[in-house]
Amino acid sequence: MKKNDVFDALRACRIVPVVKLPNVESAERLGHALLAGGITCIEVTFRSAAAEEGIRILSRIPGLLVGAGTIRSVEQARTAQRAGASFVVSPALREDVVRYALGEGLAVSPGVCTPTEVERALDLGVEVLKFFPAESFGGIGTLKALGAVYPGVPFMPTGGVNAKNLMSYLALDNVLCCGGSWLAEPRALSEQRFDEIERLAREASQLVGSQGRTAH
């Protein structure tokens, strides 16, 4: 999928479940649970041994956009890409990762939390920035301040975003989508509570849907 198509899909989805897979076996059922709940994308973090194979399994599920998170090296970015990831996300601004991804035509969103980092990312050619850790660095107030200076720059806030504050973030003009781990926590996955994950996904997608109806 082309980079711009990926960002368009993330904008349409609005919520990106950020998932640390406890095992490979949970990947397929997780993907189907999210889709059944109306969530069409996922970010699998490279914080577990199951990440690479989990991405490979999830990327085969029709209708699911799969990305890789916590990418901290070019090697990890390359591994994620080969496994089928359509986008990569970093917790910080790793210029080597950004240059690799852009060179490959791979959608990339590095983590930033200061104007200096925003400037550096924009100079590198990044189009969508991850605001991380969002709540710890001022949350909505900081995003509003950044939006005043960088009105055309979209952000993906992650870190402390949950069902209670999700809609406040999504109401901001400069928020493309939000990343959150509450939809599929490792314990719920380990205990195979896929019905619960589907319910949480449906509740979140219905919230987003109601916002869209209100806006129109």
Image (spheres, rainbow, N blue to C red):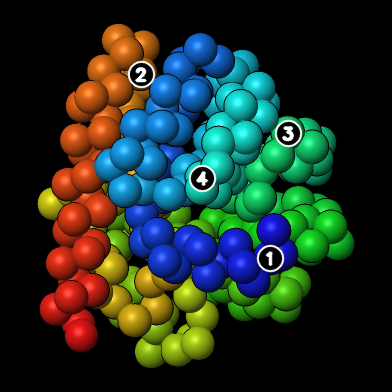
Q: Position of residue 208 (x, y in %)?
A: 23, 62
Cα separation, mark 1 vs mark 4, equals: 16 Å
Left or right of residue 50, residue 83 in this image:
right
Mark 1 closeness class: few <14, some 14–19, many ≥20 residues within 10 Å: some
Cα separation, mark 2 vs mark 4, equals: 18 Å
| Contact? badges 1 and 4 (CB < 8 Å) | no
| Contact? badges 2 and 3 (CB < 8 Å) | no
Q: Position of residue 52 (x, y in %)?
A: 67, 26
* Residue at the disc numbered 1: 3
* Residue at the disc numbered 3: 83
Label 3 sits on what residue type?
Answer: Ala
The reply to whether residue 12 is visible in this rendering is yes
* Residue at the disc numbered 4: 64
Cα separation, mark 2 vs mark 3, equals: 21 Å
Query: Which structural element holds mark 3?
Result: helix
Label 4 sits on what residue type?
Answer: Leu
